[in-house]
Amino acid sequence: MVKQQKVRFDVPDDFTPEMRESLGIQFAEEIRRRSESGIDKDGKKFPKYSKAYTESLDFNNAGKSKTKVNLTLSGDMLIALDVLTHRSGSVTIGYEKDDDEMNGKVEGNRIGSYGGKPDSTKARDFLGLPESVQEKLIRKVRSNF
């Protein structure tokens, strides 16, 4: 069984359930947008694809670019990112606990293992947001309610 991949964000205590849900959706959308631009949770470019991967049938069938790393071979991994829970003071986004396949894919990207040993030089940890982006989205949600 693969560990569930998720990230918890602190949110203001005065946020209503509707505000927390909206914020969680916006956090997930921002992670998708940024990841599709090839940027990790810390604002760094994702490491390049391995030669073996760029020569694979899956890679070629998907029409991927060897230079644009964006975590979207099929698009399923980023689409599956969702709000898991929201409680007073927090929002958690990630992947369903019982989806071992998806959690495995996410873990492989986050730690750079891709079916082997973890390698930080190959890691593409996309699951998170810089504090400044979180604060901007919190302000946006607050102004919409």
Image (cartoon, rainbow, N blue to C red):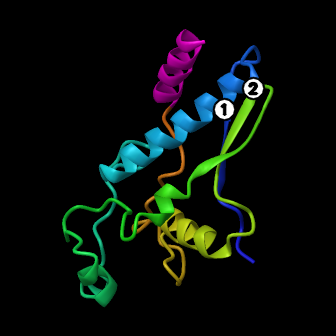
Residue drawn at (33%, 59%) of the image = 70
| Residue 114, magenta (yes or no) | no
Relative side of 35 to 76, left or right: left
Viewer-nearest residue: 4 or 15: 15
Residue under the image location 47 percent in, 52 percent down: 126
Q: Nearer the viewer, residue 107 or 23?
A: 23
User: Vertical placement of 136 versus 118: above or below?
Assistant: above
Residue density around tag 1, few if under 14, some if 14–19, many if 20 or more, within 10 Å: many
Where is residue 64? Give x, y as percent. 24, 71
Asked whether the viewer can see residue 41, the reply is no
Residue at figure coordinates x 54%, y 44% from the top left: 128
Question: In which quadrant of the rendered view does residue 2 lie?
Answer: bottom right
Tell how many labels: 2
Which residue position holds label 2? 17
Tell me: residue 113, above or below residue 6: below
Q: Mark 1 points at which residue?
A: 21
Instruction: Write the start and end of the magenta stretch as one range.
Output: 131-145
Q: Is the magenta stretch mostly helix, strand or loop?
A: helix
Residue at the far right in the pictured view:
88
Residue 47 percent across, percent down from the top left: 32, 63
